[in-house]
Image (cartoon, grey):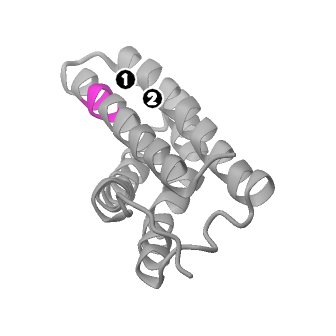
Amino acid sequence: MPTPGAVILALKIAVGVVTVLLAASLVALASGRPKWHGRINTVFFALTAITVLGFEGVIRFLRPDLTAGFTPEQREALTVHLSFSIPAAVMLPAMLITGRRQLKTLHKLLGVLFLVLWTGTFVTGIFFLPHTFEATP
């Protein structure tokens, strides 16, 4: 059974990996390689979807008690993280569709909003989520 520490560590690793992919896709775009931007973003989308669905599966079905032992500070950190990551994840299909259909103005507008949300996801996921877990009595 996954422990709270293992789940949060996996989440931190996933956020870090997909952030590197996001940066690579922006470099590809800035380098005039929009096809690579799209390809990398497709991988970004897939990995993010797998992470979100996996995390939700663990929290909702496998270990619904996983966060029961969190301190109030740990619970607050997770809530703040989710306030960025859930809207960002919800935006991903729209980003993928507008990019594939070459709806450039809408894609850029959504992209700016997504980058703000992803910055919050990265900062809260890497720096604010707890690094260690000690169950509360």
Nearest to the observer: residue 101 or residue 122: 122
Q: Which residue is mark 2?
A: 41
Q: Secondary structure at mark 2?
A: helix
Instruction: Give percent across and percent down for residue 92.
Output: 54, 45
Q: Neighbour class for label 1 at 10 Å: few (<14), some, many (≥20)?
A: many
What label does residue 121 carry, if any? none
Instruction: Give percent across and percent down for residue 94.
Output: 57, 46
Task: Give amino acid for label 2.
Answer: Asn
Task: Give amino acid for label 1.
Answer: His
**Residue sitting farthest toward the left:** 31
Residue drawn at 27 percent across, 59 percent down: 127
Prevailing secondary structure class for the magenta stretch in the rendered image: helix
Residue drawn at 55 percent across, 60 percent down: 86
Residue drawn at 41 percent across, 72 percent down: 77
The quadrant of the picture occupied by the C terminus is: bottom right
Residue 61 placement: quadrant: bottom right
Q: Which residues are magenta?
A: 22-26
On whether residue 41 falls in the magenta region, the answer is no
Q: Is residue 62 left or right of residue 95?
A: right
